[in-house]
Image (tube, rainbow, N blue to C red):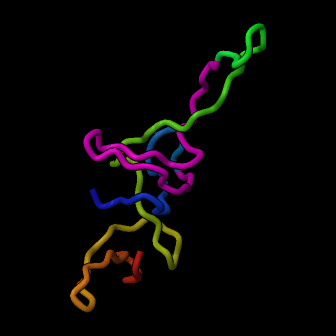
Amino acid sequence: MNIKKGDNVIVTKGKDAGKKGKILAVFPKENKVLVEGLNMKKRHQKSTTRGGKGQMVDIAHPVNRSNVAILDPKSGKPTRLGAQDVNGKKIRIAKKSGQEV
């Protein structure tokens, strides 16, 4: 999987299509990523004190990896990733602009 925690991505499909966010976590075995503030779902939460009120909280849920694309650092548009060898170290580059991601 070529997406890492901290990458800026844009959602390409689904109810959140076109929205941008930052990767919070990556789940390679499930082929999913958790994007900050996207794919929000309501969760009922019990009260922490006896006799207190419960509440509903919004929690971000994972999105399939195929539904997100890396943002180009220069133009801010979706791009693919490539690899380049610099001083014996492999770095990730954006295919559109050639800049390091």
Single out the residue that lies furthest toward the front: 50
User: Can you give x and y, in whole percent of width and height, for residue 69 in the image?
Assistant: 40, 58
- Tell me the residue at 52%/76% (across/down): 75
State which quarter of the image contains the C terminus: bottom left
Where 88 falls versus 75 (above or below)?
A: below
User: Can you give x and y, in whole percent of width and height, for residue 58 in the image?
Assistant: 63, 32
75 displayed left or right of 96: right
32 displayed left or right of 10: left
User: Can you give x and y, in whole percent of width and height, for residue 55 in the image?
Assistant: 71, 20
- Tell me the residue at 44%/51% (across/down): 12
Q: Main secondary structure of the magenta part?
A: strand
Where 25 falls versus 14 (above or below)?
A: below
Residue 28 counted in the magenta span: yes
In this view, the residue in front, 46 or 40, is 46
39 displayed left or right of 80: right
Q: What residue range appears in magenta?
A: 18-45
Single out the residue that lies furthest toward the right: 52
State which quarter of the image contains the N terminus: bottom left
User: Can you give x and y, in whole percent of width and height, for residue 27 in the image?
Assistant: 34, 44
Where 12 falls versus 14 (above or below)?
A: below
Residue 101 counted in the magenta span: no
- Tell me the residue at 37%/75% (across/down): 94
Specify the quadrant of the image occupied by residue 83.
Answer: bottom left
In this view, the residue in front, 73 or 53, is 53
Q: How many marks?
A: 0
